[in-house]
Image (tube, helix red, strand yellow):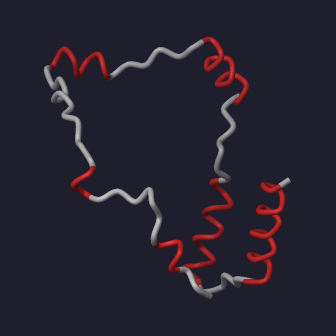
Amino acid sequence: MNISHLLKSPTTATVADTRLESTPPADTSPAALSRKGSVDLSAAARHLSSLQGGVADIDEHGVEQIRAAIAAGKLKIDPTRIADGILASARELLK
């Protein structure tokens, strides 16, 4: 397979072609840092947070079981099942 035509892109820029814009230094005063310590949530974000109802995104019990199986050397990995799962996810994304 010849890919040399891909390497000669007319949009390739050199380092000399790029220009960096300077950004002002961050305000690290105590007053500015205290303002950064709080977040105001929108009404939609508060609503979504209330819908979660304290349910964790991660199954902590399942994670502990996997850790124990790894530590005991009992974790069996089925590469075919992993590959099938990746392919199913890719198919779903491409729909």
Front in this rendered view, residue 75 or 7? 7
Residue 34 in the image: above or below residue 25: above
Q: Residue at 73% across / 83% down in the picture?
A: 79
State left or right for residue 22 relative to residue 55.
left
Front in this rendered view, residue 43 or 2? 2
Residue 40 in the image: above or below residue 21: above
Q: Residue at 62% across / 88% down in the picture?
A: 1
Residue 88 in the image: above or below residue 61: below
Q: Answer with the quarter of the image where residue 91 lies.
A: bottom right
Farthest front residue in view: 10
Front in this rendered view, residue 63 or 41? 41
Q: Position of residue 26 (x, y in %)?
A: 19, 28
Q: Residue at 70% across / 83% down in the picture?
A: 77
State left or right for residue 66 relative to residue 31.
right
Q: Residue at 26% across / 51% down in the picture?
A: 17
Front in this rendered view, residue 2 or 78? 2
State left or right for residue 63 relative to residue 41.
right
**Total label count?**
0
Q: Position of residue 78 (x, y in %)?
A: 75, 83
Q: Answer with the quarter of the image where residue 22 lies.
A: top left
Q: Position of residue 87 (x, y in %)?
A: 79, 70
